Amino acid sequence: MIGDVLLVNTLVIFALSIVGIIPVLVGFRFTDSGIDATLGFSGGVMLTVSFNMIYETGGGILQPLFFGVGFTVMWILEAIVPHEHMIKGYEGPVFFRQKLKMAWLIAFSMILHNIPEGLTVGSSTIIDQALGFSTTIAIGLQDIVEGFMAGLPYIIMGRRMSALLLSLLAASAEAGAALASGYIGTLYKGLDTVLAGVSSGAMVFIVVHEVIPETHREHFSESTIGVLLGVVTALLLEYYLG
C-alpha cells in the first residue's frame, strides 16, 4: 500500500539524516575545500531533484506558478526567520541576533532547509512510487552532508550532545513534512503536484541563495566539481531507480 511505501521512504531520510552526524561525533573533520565540495554535491542533488520533480509530477502550465510560490515563500522565510549559517553567518531580523542562542539559530536554519526536502519526498511518493524511491535516496544522500555540516559548529564549541539533538530535531522536521505532504496528497488529489512544485521552488532558492554563494567564495573548482557530482548522482538514481 502507498502508506507503507511512504512510511519506508520517511524512515530512510530520517535514518540518513542521523547518519550524517556520526562522523562529526567521532571527531572526523573535512578541510575547508572538502566542506565546499560536499556542500556543492548537496546543492547539485537538490537542483536535479527539484527540476526533475517539475517535469515528472505533472501540474501542466500551473507548475511553474507553484514553483514560483515555493521560491518566493522560502525567500520570505529566510528574511523573517532568524537563523545561522556556518559560512554566511546570521540571517534574519537584527532584533533576534542577540536574543537567541546559537543553538536555536542553527536549529532554525536546519528546519528551514529540511521541510522542503521532506515535502518533496512525501509528494513524489504519492504521485509515483518509483519516482518517490529515487527522490528519497537522492535527498537522503544530501541529508548525510547536511547532517555533517550542521553538527560542525557544535563540535567546535565542544557540545556533542547538542549536535546529536539538533540532528534528531532536523531529521524529525523533515520526516514530519514527508508524512504530512503524503497524507495531504492522499486525501486531496491534485495537492500532491502543488506540493511538489512548491517544494521544488523552495529547494532551488536554497541552492542559489545559500549553497552556491557559500561554496564558491574560495574553492571554486572543488565546489563546482561537487555540484557536477551531485547532478550526475541524482540523474543516475533517477535513471536506474525512477
Image (cartoon, rainbow, N blue to C red):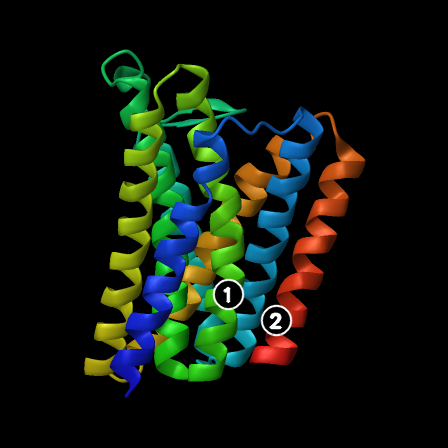
Residue 168: x percent and y percent?
29, 43
Residue 189 vs residue 222: left or right? left
Q: Nearer the viewer, residue 68 or 194?
A: 194
125 vs 88: above or below? below
Instruction: Farthest residue to the bottom: give it.
Output: 1
Residue 224 falls in image quadrant: top right
Question: What is the three-letter code of the residue carrying label 2?
Answer: Leu
Q: Name the residue located 47 percent from the left edge and 43 percent from the top edge.
A: 20
Q: Classify the position of the N terminus by image quarter.
A: bottom left
Residue 96: x percent and y percent?
26, 19
Residue 105 vs residue 90: left or right? left
Question: What is the three-letter code of the residue carrying label 1?
Answer: Ile
**Dot 1: within a 10 Å radius of its alpha carbon, few (fewer than 14), some, or many (20 or more) residues?**
many
**Dot 2: within a 10 Å radius of its alpha carbon, few (fewer than 14), some, or many (20 or more) residues?**
some
Instruction: Farthest residue to the left: give it.
Output: 187
Residue 128: x percent and y percent?
43, 84
Q: Nearer the viewer, residue 37 or 198?
A: 37
Q: Name the residue located 34 percent from the left edge and 52 percent from the top edge.
A: 115
Residue 116 falls in image quadrant: bottom left
199 vs 91: above or below? below
Which residue in the structure is indicated by mark 1? 137
> Disc 1 versus disc 2: distance between alpha carbons?
8 Å
Residue 41: x percent and y percent?
64, 48
Dot 1 and dot 2 residues touching (CB under 8 Å) = yes
Q: Earlier in the sequence, mark 1 or mark 2?
A: 1
Q: Name the residue located 47 percent from the left edge and 27 percent from the top edge.
A: 152
Which residue in the structure is indicated by mark 2? 237
Residue 28 vs residue 217: left or right? left
Q: Nearer the viewer, residue 203 or 26?
A: 26
